[in-house]
Amino acid sequence: MGGMRSGKSTLAERHAQESGLSVTYIATAEARDEGMHARIAHHRMRRPEHWKLVEVGHDLASALEREARADRCLLVDCLTLWLTQMLCGLDEKAVQSEISALLRVLSDFPGHIILVSNETNMGIVPMGELSRRYCDEAGRLHQKLGAICERVILVVAGLPLMVKGAT
């Protein structure tokens, strides 16, 4: 977890590569504008060609269930993009259902998983209703994930700071 352009994806990709397992990259971004097209292209250029790619919409939990194996590393990039897209496209009940499904899958995950997410709650409370809702939901999601994940790393200026677990 970290801020925009903090180096969190690069660190996650390095950890996936160093896992020694086959890697499946679970991409959550939707290219809705030129800026996002450029970000996605940049990520694609960095990834090894032999990594499997799975692009998902809101059904992240289903994709994880399909792809999970004891001998595989799944790298999910990025949870906050996934959350944003759901908040903009689904009703409250559906958003909560998808979050619950994700947490359920992660609680008994058979293999290695790396989750990339933006830390968004270190600033002021946003003015807009959607922005406040996003920050609230991201904060709640991060707290729940922090409770079940073995390791939590905050990335600042490309440097990993251990929040939970061993290095």
Image (spheres, rainbow, N blue to C red):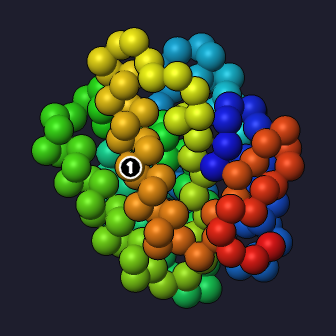
Q: Which image quadrant is residue 44 in?
A: top right
Q: Image point 53% across, 35% down: which residue?
A: 121
Q: Is residue 103 visible?
A: yes
Q: Image point 17% across, 38% down: which residue?
A: 92
Above or below — where is 167 with respect to 90?
below
- Determine whether, in the image, residue 120 is placed left or right of residue 139: right
Q: Image point 44% across, 18% down: which residue?
A: 126
Q: Secondary structure at mark 1?
A: helix
Q: Is residue 63 visible?
A: no
Residue at the front extreme, as displayed: 124
Q: List the residue tagged with mark 1.
A: 140
Q: Which image quadrant is residue 135 in?
A: top left
Q: Which image quadrant is residue 165 in?
A: bottom right
Q: Position of residue 20 (x, y in %)?
A: 78, 79
Q: Position of residue 94 (x, y in %)?
A: 17, 45
Q: Amino acid at mark 1?
A: Arg
Nearer the observer, 108 or 146: 146
Nearer the observer, 91 or 23: 91
